[in-house]
């Protein structure tokens, strides 16, 4: 049995059965829960742990957690929550910041949060930032079809490993499905999932949820105000939601059948594992087609 079919059957056997009905081989899809990415950030003083998911507010996540880990150092250094990965952070060299202790993991009062983002919207952000801006997408340049094919090929290689484990590339780590992060297969129910959208209202809602979590854990009003103000007002260097090229990228994602086919194969299970609206998907994927219809009385 293939790795993909095995994972699918263990997670949702009815989905696998319905894929066959729709002539959609399960083996063609990237499965959930491969677990190659584990970027944890810990503030033991507040019993808060976060999962940093690339292209899903990861920079904001690490900056916020760095602030909570050592408020005095962060404030005295005049650091901002919108600083880039290139910024020097005092927390970066602290093992306890990146590796949650068994005590933290077992403690029922530890609060966990992760920003999650619509998978297709997340891909658009990745394409704009890593391909058009950083020119890091193999030799694809601005060829989106090339990009989705290379992403798919790389994730398939990792998914299918048996006797050896390939080392994820820079792009693998950024493009991997959300469910591949932070051992979500084992304890997803323990995480507060903050839905981060592109528009201001969705962003505000997620930041307010984060604020409520911090307040419940005893974070001061001063720190809370800094988090909410800077996350709402500022932009990181990797932000793409105001990019002039976004509209063209979004148009191709909506209209290009090759791109859409690959995006469905890569990210479909993220739409099932997490509570996303499935409107961005093709119609046949928007319904609960894998559920057995109830018998009429």
Image (cartoon, rainbow, N blue to C red):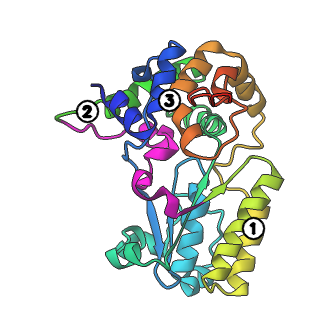
User: How far across and how far down the image is residue 115, in percent?
Assistant: 60, 56
Local crowd at mark 1 within 10 Å, few (<14), some, or many (≥20)?
A: some
Part of the protein shown in magenta: 164-192
Q: Is residue 147 visible?
A: no
Q: Nearer the viewer, residue 53 or 282?
A: 282
Tag 2 or tag 1, which sits nearer the N-term? Answer: 2
User: How far separated are the C-alphas under marks 1 and 2?
Assistant: 41 Å
- Where residue 161 is drawn, which disc sits there? 2
Residue 220 location, quadrant: bottom right
Say which residue label 1 marks: 208
Q: Residue furthest front?
A: 297
Give x and y (percent) for residue 14.
48, 30
Q: Residue at x 79, y 60 (%)?
A: 204
Mark 3 surroundings: few (<14), some (14-19) or many (≥20) residues within 10 A: many
Q: Residue at x 78, y 43 (%)?
A: 242
Q: Which secondary structure, mark 1?
A: helix
Calculate the distance from the C-alpha at mark 1 to the C-alpha at mark 3: 35 Å
**Measured along the vertical axis of the image, is residue 150 above or below residue 205?**
above
Q: Does residue 265 show up magenta in the picture?
A: no
Find the distance from the CA under tag 3 to the CA under tag 2: 24 Å
Q: Earlier in the sequence, mark 3 or mark 2?
A: 3
Q: Which residue is mark 3?
A: 15
Whichever of callouts 1 and 3 sits on the residue coming sooner in the sequence is: 3
């Amino acid at each position: 049995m293939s790795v993909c079919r095995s994972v699918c059957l263990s997670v949702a056997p009815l989905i696998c059965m319905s894929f066959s009905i729709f002539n959609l081989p399960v083996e063609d899809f990237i499965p959930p829960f491969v677990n190659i990415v584990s970027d944890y950030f810990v503030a033991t003083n507040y019993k808060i742990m976060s999962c940093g998911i690339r292209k899903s507010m990861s920079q904001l996540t690490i900056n916020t957690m760095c602030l909570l880990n050592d408020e005095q150092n962060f404030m005295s250094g005049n650091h901002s929550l919108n600083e880039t990965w290139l910024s020097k952070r005092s927390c970066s060299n602290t093992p306890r910041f990146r590796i949650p202790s068994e005590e933290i993991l077992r403690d029922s009062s530890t609060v966990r949060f992760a920003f999650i983002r619509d998978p297709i919207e997340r891909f658009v952000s990745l394409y704009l930032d890593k391909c058009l801006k950083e020119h890091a997408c193999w030799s694809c340049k601005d060829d989106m079809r090339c990009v989705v094919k290379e992403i798919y090929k790389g994730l398939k290689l990792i998914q299918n490993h048996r006797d050896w484990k390939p080392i994820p590339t820079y792009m693998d780590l950024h493009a991997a499905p959300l469910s591949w992060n932070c051992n979500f297969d084992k304890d997803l129910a323990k995480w507060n999932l903050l839905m981060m959208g592109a528009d201001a209202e969705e962003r505000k809602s997620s930041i307010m949820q984060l604020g409520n979590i911090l307040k419940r854990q005893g974070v001061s009003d001063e720190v809370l105000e800094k988090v909410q103000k800077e996350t709402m007002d500022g932009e990181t260097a990797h932000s793409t939601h105001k990019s002039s090229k976004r509209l063209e990228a979004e148009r191709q994602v909506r209209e290009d059948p090759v791109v859409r086919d690959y995006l469905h194969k890569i990210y479909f299970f993220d739409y099932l594992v997490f509570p996303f609206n499935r409107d961005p998907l093709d119609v046949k994927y928007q319904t609960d087609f894998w559920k057995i219809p109830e018998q009429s009385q």
